[in-house]
Amino acid sequence: MNSLLIDWLHSSPHGRAYLWRLKGFWSPECTRMNFADDGCHLFPRGQHRFFNNIRATVVAALNQSIGFVSHFA
């Protein structure tokens, strides 16, 4: 899988992959407020927060304001 990923990254126009981590989303308080009792599915509030974080990440990536890894070893 890593070899396929490396080949794909080298063939893409940008040749890089962005790393993203959703900070604070997994805290106990956030989990209680955003996740259903099963601990897996998001409440509507959690979905909204999750999608807002994804949107902010995409915008940051497009603005190249987040770090990136040029290839995987």
Image: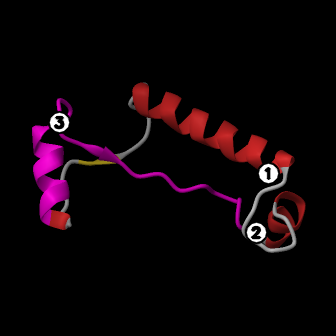
C-alpha distance separating marks 1 and 3: 33 Å
Q: Which residues are magenta?
A: 3-26
Determine whether 38 is above or below 34 in the image: below
Rate crowding at label 3 as few (under 14), some (14 to 19) or many (20 or more) other CA atoms within 10 Å. few
- For residue 2, the mark is none
Q: Nearer the viewer, residue 57 or 5?
A: 5
Whether residue 22 sits left or right of residue 7 in the image: it is right
Q: Horizontal placement of 69 versus 34: left or right?
A: left
Task: Give the x, y percent position of residue 67.
Answer: 37, 45
Disc number for residue 27: 2
Mark 3 and mark 2: Cα distance apart in space: 35 Å
The residue at 15%/58% (across/down) is 4
Residue 59 in the image: above or below residue 67? above
* Residue 26 in view (yes/no): yes
Task: Name the one closer to the observer, 20 or 36.
Answer: 36
Q: Is residue 13 above or below residue 9?
A: above
- Give the CA separation, mark 1 to mark 2: 13 Å
Q: Amino acid at mark 2?
A: Ser
The residue at which mark 1 appears reads as 46
Q: Marks 1 and 2: CB-CB under 8 Å?
A: no
What residue did someone put label 3 on? 12
